[in-house]
Protein backbone atom coordinates (compact mmCIF):
# COMPACT_ATOMS: atom_id res chain seq x y z
CA UNK A 1 0.00 0.00 0.00
CA UNK A 2 2.84 2.39 0.86
CA UNK A 3 4.48 1.62 -2.48
CA UNK A 4 1.19 2.23 -4.33
CA UNK A 5 0.78 5.58 -2.59
CA UNK A 6 4.35 6.50 -3.50
CA UNK A 7 3.73 5.64 -7.15
CA UNK A 8 0.45 7.57 -7.15
CA UNK A 9 2.08 10.67 -5.68
CA UNK A 10 4.90 10.42 -8.19
CA UNK A 11 2.51 10.09 -11.11
CA UNK A 12 0.48 13.03 -9.80
CA UNK A 13 3.62 15.20 -9.50
CA UNK A 14 4.63 14.26 -13.05
CA UNK A 15 1.17 15.07 -14.42
CA UNK A 16 1.10 18.46 -12.66
CA UNK A 17 4.63 19.26 -13.85
CA UNK A 18 3.65 18.30 -17.39
CA UNK A 19 0.58 20.52 -17.35
CA UNK A 20 2.47 23.46 -15.88
CA UNK A 21 5.18 23.07 -18.51
CA UNK A 22 2.63 22.95 -21.33
CA UNK A 23 0.80 26.02 -20.05
CA UNK A 24 4.09 27.87 -19.60
CA UNK A 25 5.16 26.81 -23.09
CA UNK A 26 1.97 28.29 -24.51
CA UNK A 27 1.99 31.52 -22.51
CA UNK A 28 5.58 32.74 -23.03
CA UNK A 29 5.07 33.10 -26.79
CA UNK A 30 2.68 35.98 -26.20
CA UNK A 31 5.25 38.41 -24.67
CA UNK A 32 7.75 37.05 -27.20
CA UNK A 33 5.55 38.20 -30.08
CA UNK A 34 4.75 41.49 -28.34
CA UNK A 35 8.45 42.28 -27.88
CA UNK A 36 9.81 41.12 -31.23
CA UNK A 37 6.79 41.57 -33.50
CA UNK A 38 5.45 39.11 -36.04
CA UNK A 39 8.82 38.98 -37.82
CA UNK A 40 10.69 38.03 -34.64
CA UNK A 41 7.98 35.53 -33.83
CA UNK A 42 8.37 34.05 -37.31
CA UNK A 43 12.11 33.55 -36.69
CA UNK A 44 11.44 31.80 -33.40
CA UNK A 45 8.77 29.57 -34.91
CA UNK A 46 11.18 28.50 -37.65
CA UNK A 47 13.38 27.09 -34.86
CA UNK A 48 10.75 25.84 -32.44
CA UNK A 49 9.67 22.60 -34.18
CA UNK A 50 13.27 21.36 -34.06
CA UNK A 51 13.52 22.33 -30.40
CA UNK A 52 10.16 20.71 -29.76
CA UNK A 53 11.14 17.42 -31.38
CA UNK A 54 14.30 17.38 -29.26
CA UNK A 55 12.23 17.96 -26.12
CA UNK A 56 9.61 15.33 -26.98
CA UNK A 57 12.25 12.66 -27.63
CA UNK A 58 14.07 13.39 -24.37
CA UNK A 59 10.92 13.85 -22.28
CA UNK A 60 8.47 11.24 -23.58
CA UNK A 61 10.04 9.01 -26.23
CA UNK A 62 13.39 7.63 -25.11
CA UNK A 63 12.61 7.84 -21.36
CA UNK A 64 9.55 5.64 -21.97
CA UNK A 65 11.76 3.12 -23.78
CA UNK A 66 14.44 3.19 -21.06
CA UNK A 67 11.72 2.78 -18.43
CA UNK A 68 10.34 -0.25 -20.29
CA UNK A 69 13.82 -1.83 -20.39
CA UNK A 70 14.37 -1.11 -16.69
CA UNK A 71 11.08 -2.73 -15.71
CA UNK A 72 11.83 -5.78 -17.86
CA UNK A 73 15.35 -6.13 -16.45
CA UNK A 74 14.05 -5.97 -12.89
CA UNK A 75 11.29 -8.49 -13.69
CA UNK A 76 13.89 -11.13 -14.49
CA UNK A 77 15.94 -10.11 -11.43
CA UNK A 78 18.67 -8.42 -13.44
CA UNK A 79 20.48 -5.64 -11.60
CA UNK A 80 20.45 -2.26 -13.35
CA UNK A 81 24.24 -1.98 -13.34
CA UNK A 82 26.50 0.22 -15.41
CA UNK A 83 27.83 -2.70 -17.47
CA UNK A 84 24.60 -4.50 -18.35
CA UNK A 85 22.17 -1.57 -18.43
CA UNK A 86 23.58 1.97 -18.31
CA UNK A 87 26.52 1.57 -20.70
CA UNK A 88 24.71 -0.16 -23.60
CA UNK A 89 21.79 2.30 -23.50
CA UNK A 90 24.11 5.33 -23.43
CA UNK A 91 26.24 3.91 -26.26
CA UNK A 92 23.14 3.43 -28.44
CA UNK A 93 21.68 6.86 -27.63
CA UNK A 94 24.99 8.69 -28.03
CA UNK A 95 25.55 7.01 -31.42
CA UNK A 96 22.09 8.10 -32.56
CA UNK A 97 22.59 11.65 -31.22
CA UNK A 98 25.98 12.03 -32.92
CA UNK A 99 24.54 10.97 -36.27
CA UNK A 100 21.59 13.35 -35.83
CA UNK A 101 23.77 16.27 -34.67
CA UNK A 102 26.42 15.89 -37.37
CA UNK A 103 23.77 15.53 -40.09
CA UNK A 104 21.98 18.70 -39.01
CA UNK A 105 25.24 20.65 -38.76
CA UNK A 106 26.42 19.57 -42.21
CA UNK A 107 23.08 20.15 -43.92
CA UNK A 108 22.17 23.36 -42.04
CA UNK A 109 22.78 25.58 -45.14
CA UNK A 110 20.56 23.31 -47.25
CA UNK A 111 17.94 23.31 -44.51
CA UNK A 112 17.95 27.12 -44.33
CA UNK A 113 17.64 27.29 -48.12
CA UNK A 114 14.75 24.85 -48.04
CA UNK A 115 12.80 26.92 -45.47
CA UNK A 116 13.54 30.07 -47.47
CA UNK A 117 15.77 32.02 -45.06
CA UNK A 118 19.57 31.69 -45.26
CA UNK A 119 19.93 33.89 -42.17
CA UNK A 120 18.86 30.89 -40.10
CA UNK A 121 21.89 28.80 -41.11
CA UNK A 122 23.97 29.55 -37.99
CA UNK A 123 20.96 28.90 -35.74
CA UNK A 124 20.38 25.50 -37.33
CA UNK A 125 24.07 24.65 -36.95
CA UNK A 126 23.93 25.59 -33.27
CA UNK A 127 20.73 23.57 -32.90
CA UNK A 128 22.68 20.44 -33.85
CA UNK A 129 24.41 20.59 -30.45
CA UNK A 130 21.05 20.22 -28.72
CA UNK A 131 20.70 16.64 -29.91
CA UNK A 132 23.81 15.72 -27.90
CA UNK A 133 21.77 16.35 -24.73
CA UNK A 134 19.34 13.54 -25.53
CA UNK A 135 21.29 10.54 -24.14
CA UNK A 136 21.89 11.60 -20.53
CA UNK A 137 18.56 13.35 -20.01
CA UNK A 138 16.62 10.46 -21.58
CA UNK A 139 18.51 7.79 -19.68
CA UNK A 140 18.15 9.39 -16.24
CA UNK A 141 14.46 10.16 -16.73
CA UNK A 142 13.75 6.65 -18.01
CA UNK A 143 15.78 5.02 -15.25
CA UNK A 144 13.87 6.78 -12.48
CA UNK A 145 10.51 6.12 -14.12
CA UNK A 146 11.51 2.46 -14.43
CA UNK A 147 12.09 2.19 -10.67
CA UNK A 148 8.82 4.03 -9.96
CA UNK A 149 10.23 7.44 -8.96
CA UNK A 150 8.60 10.18 -11.06
CA UNK A 151 9.94 13.14 -9.07
CA UNK A 152 13.27 13.54 -10.91
CA UNK A 153 11.51 13.73 -14.29
CA UNK A 154 8.98 16.24 -12.95
CA UNK A 155 11.56 18.53 -11.33
CA UNK A 156 13.96 18.36 -14.29
CA UNK A 157 11.13 19.19 -16.67
CA UNK A 158 10.05 22.24 -14.67
CA UNK A 159 13.59 23.57 -14.16
CA UNK A 160 14.37 23.05 -17.85
CA UNK A 161 11.26 24.96 -18.92
CA UNK A 162 11.70 27.79 -16.41
CA UNK A 163 15.31 28.49 -17.41
CA UNK A 164 14.54 28.16 -21.12
CA UNK A 165 11.55 30.50 -21.03
CA UNK A 166 13.39 33.05 -18.86
CA UNK A 167 16.32 33.24 -21.29
CA UNK A 168 14.01 33.59 -24.30
CA UNK A 169 12.02 36.42 -22.70
CA UNK A 170 15.21 38.24 -21.62
CA UNK A 171 16.50 37.94 -25.20
CA UNK A 172 13.21 39.32 -26.54
CA UNK A 173 13.47 42.30 -24.17
CA UNK A 174 17.03 43.02 -25.38
CA UNK A 175 15.84 42.80 -28.99
CA UNK A 176 13.01 45.23 -28.29
CA UNK A 177 15.59 47.68 -26.90
CA UNK A 178 17.69 47.12 -30.05
CA UNK A 179 20.61 45.74 -28.04
CA UNK A 180 20.39 42.44 -29.95
CA UNK A 181 19.74 41.86 -33.65
CA UNK A 182 16.28 40.48 -34.50
CA UNK A 183 17.76 37.14 -35.66
CA UNK A 184 19.28 36.72 -32.20
CA UNK A 185 15.96 35.29 -31.07
CA UNK A 186 16.66 32.17 -33.14
CA UNK A 187 20.20 31.78 -31.81
CA UNK A 188 19.28 32.43 -28.19
CA UNK A 189 16.27 30.12 -28.41
CA UNK A 190 18.82 27.37 -29.05
CA UNK A 191 21.14 28.63 -26.27
CA UNK A 192 18.13 28.59 -23.94
CA UNK A 193 17.42 24.99 -24.92
CA UNK A 194 21.04 23.99 -24.34
CA UNK A 195 21.22 25.70 -20.93
CA UNK A 196 17.84 24.25 -19.91
CA UNK A 197 19.05 20.81 -20.96
CA UNK A 198 22.22 21.14 -18.89
CA UNK A 199 20.18 22.28 -15.85
CA UNK A 200 17.83 19.33 -16.37
CA UNK A 201 20.76 16.89 -16.62
CA UNK A 202 22.33 18.26 -13.45
CA UNK A 203 19.02 17.96 -11.58
CA UNK A 204 18.68 14.34 -12.66
CA UNK A 205 22.31 13.60 -11.78
CA UNK A 206 21.77 14.83 -8.21
CA UNK A 207 18.93 12.33 -7.79
CA UNK A 208 20.97 9.57 -9.45
CA UNK A 209 23.98 10.27 -7.22
CA UNK A 210 21.83 9.86 -4.10
CA UNK A 211 20.24 6.69 -5.47
CA UNK A 212 23.60 5.18 -6.49
CA UNK A 213 24.81 5.32 -2.88
CA UNK A 214 22.01 2.94 -1.93
CA UNK A 215 22.74 0.39 -4.66
CA UNK A 216 26.31 -0.58 -5.51
CA UNK A 217 25.56 -3.89 -7.22
CA UNK A 218 28.09 -4.93 -9.88
CA UNK A 219 26.38 -8.04 -11.28
CA UNK A 220 27.43 -8.78 -14.88
CA UNK A 221 25.31 -10.44 -17.55
CA UNK A 222 25.09 -10.65 -21.33
CA UNK A 223 23.74 -7.49 -22.97
CA UNK A 224 20.92 -8.06 -25.51
CA UNK A 225 22.12 -5.29 -27.87
CA UNK A 226 19.66 -5.99 -30.69
CA UNK A 227 16.67 -5.97 -28.32
CA UNK A 228 17.85 -2.75 -26.65
CA UNK A 229 18.18 -1.06 -30.06
CA UNK A 230 14.71 -2.21 -31.15
CA UNK A 231 13.04 -1.00 -27.96
CA UNK A 232 14.85 2.36 -27.90
CA UNK A 233 14.06 3.25 -31.49
CA UNK A 234 10.80 1.49 -32.23
CA UNK A 235 9.05 1.93 -28.90
CA UNK A 236 10.81 5.21 -27.99
CA UNK A 237 10.07 7.15 -31.15
CA UNK A 238 6.54 5.76 -31.38
CA UNK A 239 5.87 6.75 -27.75
CA UNK A 240 6.90 10.33 -28.58
CA UNK A 241 4.78 10.65 -31.73
CA UNK A 242 1.41 11.15 -30.03
CA UNK A 243 2.90 14.09 -28.11
CA UNK A 244 4.19 15.52 -31.40
CA UNK A 245 0.94 15.76 -33.36
CA UNK A 246 0.62 19.57 -33.19
CA UNK A 247 4.40 19.90 -33.43
CA UNK A 248 4.52 17.97 -36.71
CA UNK A 249 1.90 20.29 -38.21
CA UNK A 250 4.14 23.25 -37.33
CA UNK A 251 7.09 21.35 -38.79
CA UNK A 252 5.28 21.15 -42.15
CA UNK A 253 4.65 24.91 -42.00
CA UNK A 254 8.38 25.59 -41.45
CA UNK A 255 9.21 24.17 -44.88
CA UNK A 256 6.18 25.19 -46.92
CA UNK A 257 4.51 28.32 -45.62
CA UNK A 258 6.95 31.12 -46.53
CA UNK A 259 7.72 29.85 -50.08
CA UNK A 260 4.02 29.36 -50.82
CA UNK A 261 3.06 32.74 -49.35
CA UNK A 262 5.56 34.28 -51.77
CA UNK A 263 3.78 32.39 -54.57
CA UNK A 264 0.51 33.82 -53.20
CA UNK A 265 1.81 37.32 -53.88
CA UNK A 266 3.68 38.58 -50.80
CA UNK A 267 7.27 39.74 -50.98
CA UNK A 268 9.80 37.83 -48.86
CA UNK A 269 9.55 40.06 -45.77
CA UNK A 270 5.74 40.16 -45.91
CA UNK A 271 5.58 36.36 -46.27
CA UNK A 272 7.76 35.94 -43.18
CA UNK A 273 5.61 38.34 -41.18
CA UNK A 274 2.41 36.60 -42.32
CA UNK A 275 3.80 33.28 -41.10
CA UNK A 276 4.36 35.04 -37.77
CA UNK A 277 0.70 36.12 -37.85
CA UNK A 278 -0.42 32.55 -38.60
CA UNK A 279 1.73 31.20 -35.76
CA UNK A 280 -0.19 33.36 -33.31
CA UNK A 281 -2.64 30.50 -33.28
CA UNK A 282 -0.12 28.01 -31.89
CA UNK A 283 -0.17 29.09 -28.21
CA UNK A 284 -3.97 29.29 -28.33
CA UNK A 285 -4.23 25.80 -29.82
CA UNK A 286 -1.71 24.44 -27.34
CA UNK A 287 -3.50 25.97 -24.37
CA UNK A 288 -6.88 24.75 -25.61
CA UNK A 289 -5.53 21.27 -26.31
CA UNK A 290 -4.08 21.09 -22.79
CA UNK A 291 -7.54 21.92 -21.45
CA UNK A 292 -9.25 19.52 -23.83
CA UNK A 293 -6.99 16.50 -23.42
CA UNK A 294 -5.04 16.67 -20.15
CA UNK A 295 -7.97 16.13 -17.80
CA UNK A 296 -9.32 13.41 -20.09
CA UNK A 297 -5.93 11.70 -20.28
CA UNK A 298 -5.97 11.49 -16.48
CA UNK A 299 -8.64 8.82 -16.95
CA UNK A 300 -6.58 6.71 -19.39
CA UNK A 301 -4.55 4.77 -16.76
CA UNK A 302 -7.80 3.20 -15.56
CA UNK A 303 -8.10 1.46 -18.94
CA UNK A 304 -5.01 -0.62 -18.19
CA UNK A 305 -6.84 -2.25 -15.28
CA UNK A 306 -9.28 -3.78 -17.80
CA UNK A 307 -12.19 -3.16 -15.42
CA UNK A 308 -15.08 -1.40 -17.12
CA UNK A 309 -12.61 -0.50 -19.89
CA UNK A 310 -15.33 0.33 -22.38
CA UNK A 311 -16.97 2.74 -19.94
CA UNK A 312 -13.65 4.41 -19.16
CA UNK A 313 -12.93 4.84 -22.89
CA UNK A 314 -16.37 6.34 -23.34
CA UNK A 315 -15.87 8.73 -20.43
CA UNK A 316 -12.40 9.74 -21.61
CA UNK A 317 -13.43 10.50 -25.19
CA UNK A 318 -16.65 12.31 -24.37
CA UNK A 319 -14.95 14.36 -21.66
CA UNK A 320 -12.24 15.42 -24.09
CA UNK A 321 -14.90 16.29 -26.67
CA UNK A 322 -16.99 18.38 -24.27
CA UNK A 323 -14.06 20.39 -22.91
CA UNK A 324 -12.36 20.92 -26.28
CA UNK A 325 -15.60 21.83 -28.05
CA UNK A 326 -16.39 24.47 -25.44
CA UNK A 327 -12.89 25.94 -25.64
CA UNK A 328 -13.04 25.93 -29.46
CA UNK A 329 -16.40 27.66 -29.78
CA UNK A 330 -15.62 30.16 -27.04
CA UNK A 331 -12.29 31.12 -28.63
CA UNK A 332 -13.82 31.46 -32.09
CA UNK A 333 -16.41 33.92 -30.74
CA UNK A 334 -14.00 36.09 -28.74
CA UNK A 335 -10.95 35.71 -31.01
CA UNK A 336 -11.04 39.31 -32.35
CA UNK A 337 -10.71 40.58 -28.77
CA UNK A 338 -8.17 37.89 -27.82
CA UNK A 339 -6.06 38.68 -30.90
CA UNK A 340 -6.08 42.37 -30.00
CA UNK A 341 -5.32 41.72 -26.33
CA UNK A 342 -2.50 39.22 -26.83
CA UNK A 343 -0.92 40.42 -30.08
CA UNK A 344 -1.80 44.15 -30.22
CA UNK A 345 -3.85 44.00 -33.46
CA UNK A 346 -6.46 41.85 -35.22
CA UNK A 347 -4.37 40.68 -38.20
CA UNK A 348 -5.36 37.26 -39.49
CA UNK A 349 -8.41 36.93 -37.24
CA UNK A 350 -10.59 34.95 -39.68
CA UNK A 351 -7.79 32.51 -40.55
CA UNK A 352 -7.08 32.03 -36.84
CA UNK A 353 -10.77 31.43 -36.12
CA UNK A 354 -10.76 28.58 -38.64
CA UNK A 355 -7.51 27.30 -37.12
CA UNK A 356 -9.12 27.12 -33.66
CA UNK A 357 -10.99 24.01 -34.80
CA UNK A 358 -7.62 22.32 -34.31
CA UNK A 359 -8.26 22.50 -30.54
CA UNK A 360 -11.25 20.18 -30.84
CA UNK A 361 -9.75 17.85 -33.44
CA UNK A 362 -6.31 17.80 -31.80
CA UNK A 363 -7.74 16.98 -28.37
CA UNK A 364 -9.80 14.07 -29.71
CA UNK A 365 -6.84 12.79 -31.75
CA UNK A 366 -4.42 12.92 -28.80
CA UNK A 367 -6.92 11.25 -26.46
CA UNK A 368 -8.01 8.49 -28.86
CA UNK A 369 -4.42 7.72 -29.87
CA UNK A 370 -3.37 7.55 -26.21
CA UNK A 371 -6.12 4.97 -25.65
CA UNK A 372 -4.99 2.98 -28.70
CA UNK A 373 -1.39 3.06 -27.52
CA UNK A 374 -2.44 1.83 -24.08
CA UNK A 375 -3.78 -1.27 -25.88
CA UNK A 376 -0.61 -1.73 -27.92
CA UNK A 377 -1.75 -0.28 -31.26
CA UNK A 378 1.59 1.45 -31.80
CA UNK A 379 2.08 0.71 -35.50
CA UNK A 380 -1.41 1.86 -36.43
CA UNK A 381 -1.04 5.12 -34.49
CA UNK A 382 2.38 5.75 -36.03
CA UNK A 383 1.07 5.21 -39.55
CA UNK A 384 -1.88 7.55 -38.95
CA UNK A 385 0.32 10.36 -37.56
CA UNK A 386 2.82 10.09 -40.42
CA UNK A 387 -0.07 10.14 -42.91
CA UNK A 388 -1.47 13.24 -41.20
CA UNK A 389 1.89 15.00 -41.63
CA UNK A 390 2.07 14.10 -45.33
CA UNK A 391 -1.48 15.34 -45.93
CA UNK A 392 -0.73 18.64 -44.17
CA UNK A 393 2.50 19.05 -46.17
CA UNK A 394 0.82 18.41 -49.53
CA UNK A 395 -2.26 20.53 -48.75
CA UNK A 396 -0.03 23.49 -47.86
CA UNK A 397 1.38 23.33 -51.40
CA UNK A 398 -2.11 23.13 -52.89
CA UNK A 399 -3.92 25.71 -50.75
CA UNK A 400 -1.50 28.38 -49.43
CA UNK A 401 -0.52 29.69 -52.86
CA UNK A 402 -4.26 30.23 -53.57
CA UNK A 403 -5.64 31.27 -50.16
CA UNK A 404 -2.66 32.57 -48.16
CA UNK A 405 -2.57 31.69 -44.46
CA UNK A 406 -6.24 30.70 -44.66
CA UNK A 407 -5.06 27.82 -46.85
CA UNK A 408 -2.71 26.64 -44.12
CA UNK A 409 -5.58 26.79 -41.61
CA UNK A 410 -7.68 24.55 -43.87
CA UNK A 411 -4.69 22.22 -44.39
CA UNK A 412 -4.28 21.85 -40.62
CA UNK A 413 -7.98 21.17 -40.03
CA UNK A 414 -8.31 18.65 -42.87
CA UNK A 415 -5.21 16.69 -41.80
CA UNK A 416 -6.37 16.59 -38.16
CA UNK A 417 -9.87 15.55 -39.26
CA UNK A 418 -8.32 12.65 -41.16
CA UNK A 419 -6.41 11.61 -38.04
CA UNK A 420 -9.49 11.87 -35.81
CA UNK A 421 -11.84 9.94 -38.08
CA UNK A 422 -9.46 7.02 -38.61
CA UNK A 423 -8.35 6.88 -34.95
CA UNK A 424 -11.96 6.73 -33.80
CA UNK A 425 -12.74 4.14 -36.47
CA UNK A 426 -9.95 1.85 -35.26
CA UNK A 427 -11.12 2.38 -31.69
CA UNK A 428 -14.66 1.40 -32.61
CA UNK A 429 -13.86 -1.59 -34.84
CA UNK A 430 -11.03 -3.09 -32.82
CA UNK A 431 -11.90 -2.36 -29.19
CA UNK A 432 -15.24 -1.01 -28.10
CA UNK A 433 -17.80 -1.45 -30.89
CA UNK A 434 -19.06 1.95 -29.74
CA UNK A 435 -19.76 4.74 -32.20
CA UNK A 436 -18.30 8.03 -31.03
CA UNK A 437 -21.46 9.92 -31.98
CA UNK A 438 -23.66 7.68 -29.84
CA UNK A 439 -21.51 8.44 -26.78
CA UNK A 440 -22.38 12.14 -26.76
CA UNK A 441 -25.27 13.56 -24.75
CA UNK A 442 -26.37 15.72 -27.67
CA UNK A 443 -29.17 17.49 -25.81
CA UNK A 444 -26.84 18.79 -23.11
CA UNK A 445 -24.08 19.49 -25.62
CA UNK A 446 -26.24 21.52 -28.03
CA UNK A 447 -27.95 23.48 -25.26
CA UNK A 448 -24.62 24.17 -23.55
CA UNK A 449 -23.10 25.53 -26.76
CA UNK A 450 -26.17 27.59 -27.64
CA UNK A 451 -26.31 28.96 -24.08
CA UNK A 452 -22.60 29.81 -23.98
CA UNK A 453 -22.56 31.32 -27.48
CA UNK A 454 -25.68 33.40 -26.76
CA UNK A 455 -24.23 34.66 -23.48
CA UNK A 456 -20.90 35.61 -25.07
CA UNK A 457 -22.51 37.35 -28.06
CA UNK A 458 -24.91 39.32 -25.83
CA UNK A 459 -22.03 40.42 -23.57
CA UNK A 460 -19.96 41.40 -26.61
CA UNK A 461 -22.86 43.41 -28.03
CA UNK A 462 -23.61 45.22 -24.76
CA UNK A 463 -20.13 45.87 -23.41
CA UNK A 464 -17.53 45.03 -26.09
CA UNK A 465 -16.82 48.59 -27.25
CA UNK A 466 -16.44 49.91 -23.70
CA UNK A 467 -13.24 47.98 -22.98
CA UNK A 468 -11.19 48.64 -26.10
CA UNK A 469 -9.46 51.76 -24.77
CA UNK A 470 -6.68 49.88 -22.97
CA UNK A 471 -5.25 46.36 -22.83
CA UNK A 472 -5.80 46.21 -19.07
CA UNK A 473 -9.52 46.88 -19.43
CA UNK A 474 -9.65 44.44 -22.33
CA UNK A 475 -8.00 41.78 -20.18
CA UNK A 476 -10.55 42.30 -17.39
CA UNK A 477 -13.38 42.14 -19.92
CA UNK A 478 -12.12 38.93 -21.59
CA UNK A 479 -11.40 37.24 -18.24
CA UNK A 480 -14.92 38.07 -17.09
CA UNK A 481 -16.75 36.82 -20.18
CA UNK A 482 -14.59 33.68 -20.33
CA UNK A 483 -15.55 32.88 -16.72
CA UNK A 484 -19.23 33.58 -17.41
CA UNK A 485 -19.16 31.52 -20.62
CA UNK A 486 -17.50 28.59 -18.84
CA UNK A 487 -20.08 28.68 -16.03
CA UNK A 488 -22.96 28.72 -18.51
CA UNK A 489 -21.40 25.84 -20.43
CA UNK A 490 -20.83 23.77 -17.30
CA UNK A 491 -24.30 24.54 -15.91
CA UNK A 492 -26.05 22.80 -18.81
CA UNK A 493 -23.91 19.68 -18.47
CA UNK A 494 -24.64 19.50 -14.77
CA UNK A 495 -28.32 20.30 -15.30
CA UNK A 496 -28.78 17.38 -17.73
CA UNK A 497 -26.45 14.94 -15.92
CA UNK A 498 -24.12 14.71 -18.91
CA UNK A 499 -20.98 14.18 -16.80
CA UNK A 500 -20.31 10.95 -14.92
CA UNK A 501 -18.70 10.83 -11.49
CA UNK A 502 -15.51 9.56 -13.11
CA UNK A 503 -15.44 12.57 -15.46
CA UNK A 504 -16.16 15.01 -12.64
CA UNK A 505 -13.35 13.48 -10.59
CA UNK A 506 -10.84 14.52 -13.28
CA UNK A 507 -11.82 18.19 -12.99
CA UNK A 508 -10.07 20.63 -10.66
CA UNK A 509 -12.07 22.31 -7.89
CA UNK A 510 -14.34 19.27 -7.81
CA UNK A 511 -16.05 20.25 -4.53
CA UNK A 512 -17.15 23.61 -5.94
CA UNK A 513 -18.49 21.89 -9.06
CA UNK A 514 -20.46 19.34 -7.05
CA UNK A 515 -22.03 22.15 -5.02
CA UNK A 516 -23.07 23.84 -8.27
CA UNK A 517 -24.59 20.55 -9.38
CA UNK A 518 -26.66 20.30 -6.20
CA UNK A 519 -27.84 23.91 -6.56
CA UNK A 520 -28.86 23.35 -10.19
CA UNK A 521 -30.86 20.25 -9.23
CA UNK A 522 -32.61 22.04 -6.35
CA UNK A 523 -33.65 24.90 -8.64
CA UNK A 524 -35.02 22.50 -11.22
CA UNK A 525 -37.49 20.95 -8.73
Image (spheres, rainbow, N blue to C red):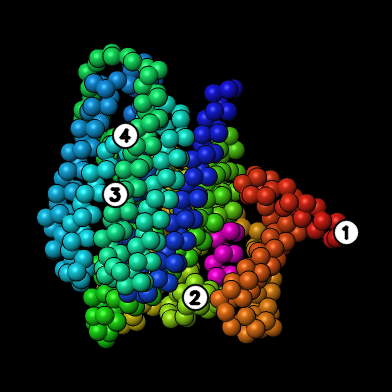
| Disc 1 crowd, CA 10 A, few/some/many (<14, 14-19, 20+) | few
Quarter of the N terminus within the rendering: top right
Find residue 525 and name its label.
Answer: 1
Magenta run includes residue 38: no
Which quarter of the image is occupied by the C terminus? bottom right
Horizontal and vertical percent position of residue 274: 34, 78
Q: Could you tell me which secondary element the residue under label 1 belongs to?
A: loop
Read off the residue under disc 2. Answer: 339
Please name whichever residue, 242 or 54, is drawn nearer the observer in this view of the structure: 54
Tag 4 residue: 139
Residue occupying the far right of the picture: 525
How far is the residue under mark 3 from the one under mark 2?
A: 32 Å
Q: Nearer the viewer, mark 4 or mark 3?
A: 3
Identity of the residue drawn at 40% across and 61% down = 169
Q: Which residues are magenta?
A: 322-331
Q: Are marks 4 and 3 in contact (CB under 8 Å)?
A: no
- Give the camera-side residue of 232 and 465: 465
Q: Look at the numbered disc 2 and give the secondary structure of its residue.
A: helix
**Secondary element type, mark 4:** helix
Q: Give the number of the disc on residue 194.
A: 3
For the point 27% across and 43% down, the residue is: 133
First along the sequence among labels 2 and 1: 2
Amino acid sequence: MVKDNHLFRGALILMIAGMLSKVLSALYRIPLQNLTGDFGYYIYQQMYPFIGILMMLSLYGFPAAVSKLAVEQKAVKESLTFINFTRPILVILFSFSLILASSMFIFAPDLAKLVGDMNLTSSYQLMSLGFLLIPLVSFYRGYFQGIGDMRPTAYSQLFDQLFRVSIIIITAILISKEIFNIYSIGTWAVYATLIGGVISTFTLYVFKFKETKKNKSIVKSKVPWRYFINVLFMFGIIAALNHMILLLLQFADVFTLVPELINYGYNEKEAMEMKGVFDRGQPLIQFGAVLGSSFALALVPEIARKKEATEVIKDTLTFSFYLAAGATLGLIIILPEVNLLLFKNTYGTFSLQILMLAILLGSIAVTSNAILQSYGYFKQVTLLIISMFIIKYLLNYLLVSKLGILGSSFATIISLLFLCVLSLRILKDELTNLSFFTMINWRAFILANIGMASGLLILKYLFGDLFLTSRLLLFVYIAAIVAIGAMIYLFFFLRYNALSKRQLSALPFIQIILKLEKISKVKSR
